[in-house]
Image: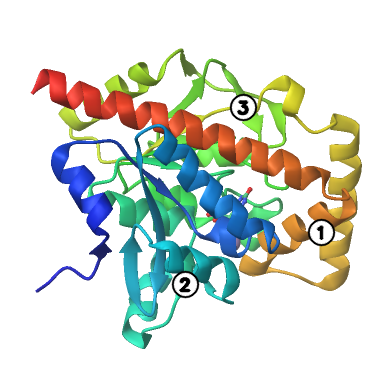
Amino acid sequence: MTSPLRVSAAVADALADGRPVVALESTIISHGLPRPRNLEAAREFEEILRSRGVTAATIAVLDGVPRIGLDAEGVERIASEDMAKASVRDLPILSAKRISGATTVAATAYLASKAGVRVFATGGLGGVHRGAGQTFDESADLSALAISPVAVVSAGVKSVLDIGATLERLETLSVPVIGYRTTNFPSFWLRDSGHTIDWSVDSAAEIAEVMHSQDALGHGQGIVVANPIPLDQQWDPDEHDRVLAQAFAAAEAAGVHGKAVTPFLLGFIVDASGGKSLEVNLDIARNNVRLAADIAIAWSERASTRE
Ligand code: PSU
Ligand code: MN
């Protein structure tokens, strides 16, 4: 059987040569950022990688085919078409129906690992929703990381989620959580969620070392690399708290539930903050793409010097 994935020539060549590659998700572009800033952002994230000599592997399902690495037209499609939000469980359905979908962290991590891409940059991870004790609403991002050996760089999870419960689930799923130069787990727009984590590293090379040890131990999980936004770029904490309270009230009033909750809250927060949260969001993503580039470079250098 031929592979159902289509890996772009640029990504395939880089992987074959042992050059650095970073995966990027498409749900953040299709559903997480407003148009037309989303297209600029998608191009900019790829450009940050390219300027560092790292190959971008933006991942999406186009007409049923999971793509690892998009051309310029593919990037335009994820930014402008109304696509399904695709998690891992949606992949076989999109394939059979030959329809397109923007991949979540879960689906992106899963597809990246299948293609041999080991480093992935995103903004924030999905996690356990508030009230999950009743609704059971927990993002498949967590369970996908339990089966996808990819280091995912994020600024933690948004404070719209239950951060403590999210960290507990990652522990249960045996997914390592490592702070980049911190043991405070970030809450996306803010540097510190109030939750601490056990481990931190000081360099990208150290993360590559953990990835190597993980492989040597036969541990097939992903790694959550928590990369807090620099203090001078974080959102004003008072404004953050005020806007979040409004967003929860609005979601409740609108009766939003299931996988529509995250996009609803994120859209509301962008509007209610007058665009401020969006600027912080973009700074976070850029920052994560840069660290992911450094990790991918360290990973490829490590492989070339030790093999
Ligand atoms: N968190 C963000 N921005 C995002 C998302 C999460 O700060 O755009 C997106 C990611 O694609 C993530 C998905 O994988 O939402 C999680 O959605 P759900 O909770 O429905 O699994
Ligand atoms: Mn959900």
Residue type at the position of mark 1 = Phe
On screen, residue 195 above or below 248: above
Do residues under tags 3 and 1 come within 8 Å of each other at their CB atoms?
no
Going from the N terminus, do you reach mark 3 or mark 1 first? 3
On screen, residue 247 above or below 289: below
Residue type at the position of mark 2 = Gly
Going from the N terminus, do you reach mark 2 or mark 1 first? 2
Disc 1 C-beta below 8 A from ligand 1 = no
The residue at the point 64 percent across, 54 percent down is 132
How far apart, in angstroms, are the residues tagged by discs 3 and 1?
A: 23 Å
Quarter of image, ligand 2: bottom right
* 10 Å crowding of disc 3: few (<14), some (14-19), many (20+): many
Q: Position of residue 252 (x, y in %)?
A: 84, 64
* 10 Å crowding of disc 2: few (<14), some (14-19), many (20+): many
Q: Which residue is mark 3?
A: 228
Disc 3 C-beta below 8 A from ligand 1 = no
88 to the left or right of 298? right
Q: Which residue is mark 2?
A: 101
Q: Which residue is mark 1?
A: 268
Q: Quick one: quadrant of the C terminus?
A: top left
Closest to the observer, 217 or 203: 203
Closest to the observer, 51 or 90: 51
Q: Position of residue 146 (x, y in %)?
A: 36, 45
